[in-house]
Image (tube, rainbow, N blue to C red):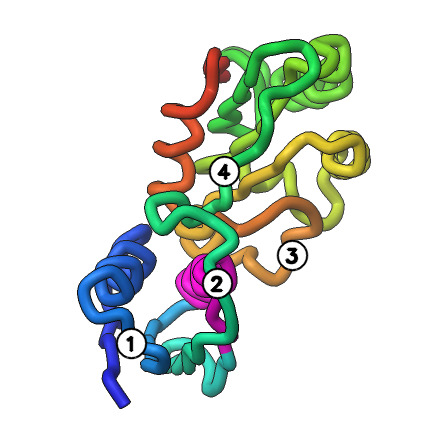
């Protein structure tokens, strides 16, 4: 069975390598080896969108994902996050990129309170609010115990897409503490920016 060795590759390289393999070979079955949980989740999610089952064995730093073709693709091969959402009822797609667990500079306690209030107020955007993306220390807002966790979960339940950077979760060693959103990679984030009508970065 063909095997792609993606160990040691930084996000989003494992997804890109998997995509290229499918496009170039059309193999109905193959294996992908990765070395971290973020890559495991990202590759498995991408495979599902391409009509493959993804059986995971082993554990980091040596995980094997066995891909078996089960049906037609449900997402474009260039779009690992399945970003084919319809335009919101409001007519625009607004993406909010949150790159820190506090807002502004100066007093950290004030900054943490401000970012919580910012997220609490996001529903005021109405149906235009399409996607929240958390990167760097912003991923800490998605964790168990985060003061903003319930507000983010409520947004997700309302239909807002929530993506959380897997590389960042791995860096802070908090992957197992994430309680909201999909673990994502830089390709998903860049594609989100391309699809969004407006990007707000804080």
- Does residue 99 show up? yes
Q: Which residue is mark 4?
A: 83
Q: Residue at left 44%, top 80%?
A: 68
Q: CA distance from mark 2 to mark 4?
A: 17 Å
Q: Quadrant of residue 62?
A: bottom left
Dot 4 alpha-carbon crowd within 10 angstroms: few under 14, some 14 to 19, many 20 or more: some
Q: Position of residue 132 (x, y in %)?
A: 58, 29
Of mark 3 and mark 2, the one earlier in the sequence is 2
Asked whether 53 or 177 is in front, the reply is 53
Q: Residue at left 27%, top 90%?
A: 1
In-image side of 150 versus 44 (left or right)? right
Give the magenta range: 37-54
In-image side of 39 versus 183 (left or right)? left
Determine the secondary structure under disc 2: loop
Of mark 1 and mark 2, the one earlier in the sequence is 1
Q: Which residue is mark 2?
A: 72
The nearer-to-camera label among 1 and 3 is 1
| Most distant residue in the bottom direction | 1
Asked whether 50 or 14 is in front, the reply is 50
Asked whether 162 or 93 is in front, the reply is 93
Q: CA distance from mark 4 to mark 1?
A: 24 Å
Q: Position of residue 83 (x, y in %)?
A: 49, 38
Q: Position of residue 144 (x, y in %)?
A: 72, 50
């Amino acid at each position: 069975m063909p095997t792609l060795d993606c160990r040691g590759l930084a996000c989003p390289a494992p997804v890109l390598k998997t995509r290229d393999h499918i496009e170039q070979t059309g193999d109905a079955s193959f294996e992908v080896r990765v070395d971290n949980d973020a890559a495991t989740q990202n590759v498995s999610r991408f495979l599902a969108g391409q009509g493959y089952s993804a059986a995971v064995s082993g554990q980091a730093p040596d995980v094997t994902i066995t891909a078996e073709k089960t049906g037609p693709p449900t997402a474009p091969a260039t779009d690992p996050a399945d970003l084919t959402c319809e335009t919101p009822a409001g007519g625009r797609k607004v993406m909010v990129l949150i790159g820190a667990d506090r807002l502004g500079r100066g007093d950290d306690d004030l900054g943490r309170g401000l970012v919580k209030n910012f997220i609490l107020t996001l529903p005021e955007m109405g149906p235009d609010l399409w996607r929240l993306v958390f990167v760097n220390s912003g991923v800490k807002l998605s964790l168990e115990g985060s003061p903003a966790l319930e507000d983010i979960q409520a947004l997700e339940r309302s239909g807002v897409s929530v993506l959380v950077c897997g590389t960042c979760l791995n860096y802070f060693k908090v992957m197992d503490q994430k309680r909201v959103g999909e673990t994502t990679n830089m390709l998903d984030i860049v594609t989100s920016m391309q699809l969004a009508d407006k990007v707000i970065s804080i």
